[in-house]
Amino acid sequence: MGMALKNLASAMNNTQALEAAAIILGSEPTPIAIAYRAEQLEMLPQAVSDIRSVLAKPGCNWQEFWNVAQEYEVIKSDYWAELTTQETELIKTLENSSTQPRTIGIGSTVAHADPYRTLYLERGEVVDEVEGKVVVAWDHWCNELKKTQSYSREELRFWQGENQ
């Protein structure tokens, strides 16, 4: 209905239709804002379909869901409203059962956070914490004299495997 009012308002240059379309679409009553919101809502059926497809897979995990959900982050409240109670509960359960640690600490497998650093593709393990920094033993340094180096947590990210 909001889309129809948007088209009507554009065709007739009618301020009241524009305001009505803005209310229904949840945007500002300007042609640009309404067009932007309408474009977002055109993605909604595909977003719901993609998310349901991932949730329906046997053994679905948080990372699989998150990979799809990030594509539709801008319309999260819209697709969330379209999902069933069971689907939203499953998403919450997946998030709560996610095994990825929230902070980098001793035992975390890491790589450098900066994609322009040579250590971005290298794997290391946090072996110690010293004065607010973490000490990383890099796998590829195992045969060298220098085996560890300290970093702030912000310089590192969790290791994601060979296919970044």
Image: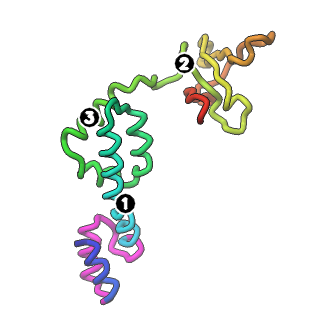
Secondary element at tag 1? loop
Indicate yes or no whether the magenta region holds residue 32. yes
The residue tagged 2 is 108
The residue tagged 3 is 90
Q: Which amino acid does label 1 sit on?
A: Met
The residue tagged 1 is 43
Q: In which quarter of the image is residue 92?
A: top left
Q: How far apart are marks 1 and 2 (CA)?
A: 37 Å
Q: In this view, does 113 lie above or below 72?
A: above
Residue 115 location, x and y as percent?
67, 38
- Please indicate whether residue 107 sits to the left or right of residue 135 in the image: left
Secondary element at tag 3? helix
Q: Are marks 3 and 2 in contact (CB under 8 Å)?
A: no
Rendered residue at 62%/25% (across/down): 152
Q: Nearer the viewer, residue 20 or 53?
A: 53
Give the residue furthest to the bottom: 12
- Please indicate whether residue 63 sits to the left or right of residue 86 in the image: right
Q: Is residue 77 above or below residue 120?
A: below
Indicate yes or no whether the magenta region holds residue 109. no
Magenta stretch bounds: 12-33
Q: Which of marks 1 and 2 is in front?
A: 1
Rendered residue at 67%/32% (across/down): 120
Give the residue furthest to the left: 85
Q: Distance between the residues labelled 1 and 3?
A: 22 Å
Q: Which amino acid does label 3 sit on?
A: Leu
